[in-house]
Image: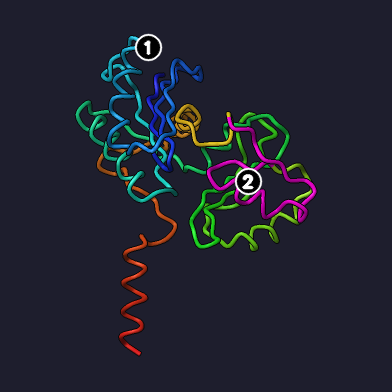
Amino acid sequence: MKIFAVDTSAKSASVALVEDGVIKGEHFINTMLTHSETLMPMADSLFKSVRTEPKDIDCFAVNCGPGSFTGLRIGIAAVKGMAYALDKPCAAVSTLESMAYNLSRENTVVCAVMDARCNQVYNALFDVSDSEPVRLCEDRALQINELISDLRNINKKIVLVGDGAKLCFDKMWGELENIELASENIRFQRASSTAIAAEKLFEKGEILTSSQLMPKYLRLPQAQRELIAKNKLNNK
């Protein structure tokens, strides 16, 4: 089975092709260029590099959230378009869960964290002792100090991954003795891990049509939050 996966959930972007659990190719970029500039050229280059055509893909996968509101929409729109044109199924992968696959079989707890601003993070916890990560909590948005309190109950080694990992590590250093920061090469979202997570969803029959594929936000966009706050002030 061939899975083509996309991640545009944060500043970095990547595409990957995984066939029967084997990474055939992956392109990763972490620059100041927008995803609308980099995503499709990366996808085109990857297909050419692995000598595969989009019509040969069995499932299109994407990290559907949490993450950057604009970034998620770009990645999801690209996958929806390809899947619709080719009448192929889609897999909607949790951005946080995909990162747990970066450290499979490490006998540790992965703490996936993405910077949500205002001292908040998007977070989920996974035990990765076995071949497939075991989710310990649902995706959530919470204050960093709340996360620290939650992690005090875990006795195993905890590894921080995600674009909020360094931010959390700096705040947790000295607070938690069993915390580690993942190295750069496995810290961030990667489409190859998205594809591997999608393969598990495909095997369970948890796939979607292109029209069903939607972003999954854990909180409202900033503009909407500001509008609600403004309306509350005006109604006082």
Asked if marks 2 and 1 touch (Cβ < 8 Å), the reply is no
Where is 44 relative to 179, above or below? above
**What range is drawn magenta here?**
159-184
Question: Residue furthest toward the left?
Answer: 85
Question: Counting other residues with Cα less than 10 Å from the Cα at mark 2, is it few (<14), some (14-19), or many (20 or more)?
Answer: many
Residue 165 forms part of the magenta stretch: yes
Residue 16 forms part of the magenta stretch: no
> The residue under label 2 is which amino acid type?
Cys
- Secondary structure of the residue carrying tag 2 is strand
Which residue is identified by label 2? 111
Query: For this view, does 190 lie left or right of residue 181?
Result: left
Expressed as whole percent of the image width and height from the top left, the position of residue 180 reads 71, 41
Q: Residue at x 52, y 48 (%)?
A: 114
| Mark before the other along the chain sequence, 2 or 1 | 1
Q: Residue at x 44, y 57 (%)?
A: 218
> The residue under label 1 is which amino acid type?
Val
Instruction: Name the quarter where the C terminus is drawn.
Output: bottom left
Expressed as whole percent of the image width and height from the top left, the position of residue 213 reads 31, 43
Query: For this view, does 105 lie left or right of residue 77?
Result: right
Where is 1 relative to 145, above or below? above
Front in this rendered view, residue 1 or 15: 15
Which residue is identified by label 1? 50
Expressed as whole percent of the image width and height from the top left, the position of residue 76 reads 31, 40
Front in this rendered view, residue 89 or 63: 63
Q: CA distance from mark 2 to mark 1?
A: 33 Å
Colouring convention used in this rendered image of the protein: rainbow
Q: Residue at x 34, y 36 (%)?
A: 33
